[in-house]
Amino acid sequence: MQYREVYRWGENELAHAGIEESKLDARLLMEHVCGTDRNTLLVHGDREVSQADQKHYEEVIGQRCSHVPLQQITGVQEFMGLEFLVNEHVLIPRQDTECLVEEAMRFLHDGSRILDMCTGSGCILLSLLHYSNGCKGVGVDISREALKVARANAERIMALPRPGVEPIAGGSEDLQFVESDLFSGLSEEKFEMILSNPPYIASSVIPTLMEEVREHEPLLALDGKEDGLFFYRRIIDAAKAYLVKEGRLFFEIGHDQAESVSGLMEDAGFEEVTVVKDLAGLDRVVHGIWMG
């Protein structure tokens, strides 16, 4: 069959399965299977697709029809202009979270020590390290499988060339990943910056999430317990002992959690607590300073 015909078959299958972005996903899966780009469909739609590629495409279309996330099928997701490995053990990096990284970069200084709590794929910490100089980072997660993904991403991301900057190997002393229930497994090191995108969805809301998230992303990284604030409370309470004087604590939050998380930080003694909106105009980041 021709490339264009195979693509149209995939698009129809996804549309019948209720996949909203059926055209886009069908094309991206074609590119993934055939090693092509968008121009192939536009300019070379009459090229013949090998039987092996057609069979593989039918398989991945079947996965997507079952609402397996596109990124788990392709194994990658772009974030902050970088390509990260993903699988079913980590949350798929989302554009919303770029707001957290971009806000943190406003206050990041060369040589800062950064702690990324609930690191998952490592996308937050590794993006900050990639776009800074001489910073040191620790990523913490309770999931051993998630940390395997983070370490694999470290090997890829920190080896990328940066003008005037020596690559950081994933196992160097400047970058560590620690398996821990929040702060329990950490040393007494202090940090200039602590960031977290913790589980923040209330348990009762999880059954209402779209199937791609509810059935295929790790519950451990989604469930914020009864009111969605469980991990904010724990992190805010413990973070004070791990921040230097005038260190900053940054959170990603749900769109309706700004008042609650800000209040928790202020009650704990954080100053200059600030709420930042994302590109959609929704509250997305809360951060504040610990004066010690």
Image (cartoon, rainbow, N blue to C red):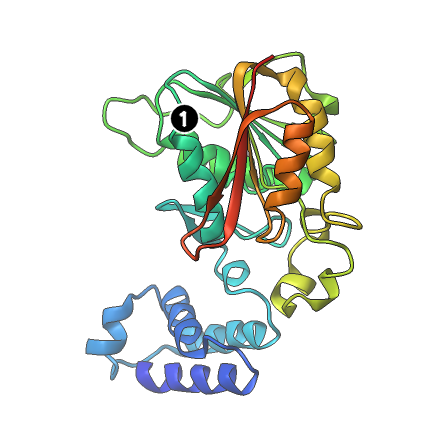
Q: Quadrant of residue 145?
A: top right
Q: Nearer the viewer, residue 227 or 65?
A: 227
Relative to 138, is 246 above or below? Answer: above
| In-image side of 250 versus 142 (left or right) | left
| In-image side of 58 versus 142 (left or right) | left
| Farthest right residue in view | 226
Residue 233 percent coordinates (x, y): 73, 34
Residue at x 67%, y 14% (from the top left corner)? 187
Residue 35 percent coordinates (x, y): 34, 63
Query: Is residue 216 visible in the rendered structure shown here?
Result: yes
Q: Nearer the viewer, residue 148 or 79?
A: 79
| Farthest left residue in view | 43
Relative to 69, is 149 above or below? Answer: above
- Work out which quarter of the rendered image holds the C terminus and state it: top right
**Which residue is tagged 1?**
107
Three-letter amino acid code at the position of disc 1: Phe
- Tag 1's secondary structure? loop
| In-image side of 129 versus 19 (left or right) | left
Q: Quadrant of residue 198?
A: top right
Residue 3 percent coordinates (x, y): 32, 80
Relative to 238, is 85 above or below? Answer: below
Badge 1, how many Cα within 10 Å: few under 14, some, many 20+?
Answer: few
Q: Nearer the viewer, residue 14 or 104?
A: 104
Residue at x 72%, y 22% (from the top left corner)? 185
Residue at x 29%, y 22% (from the top left corner)? 165
Relative to 247, is 234 above or below? Answer: below
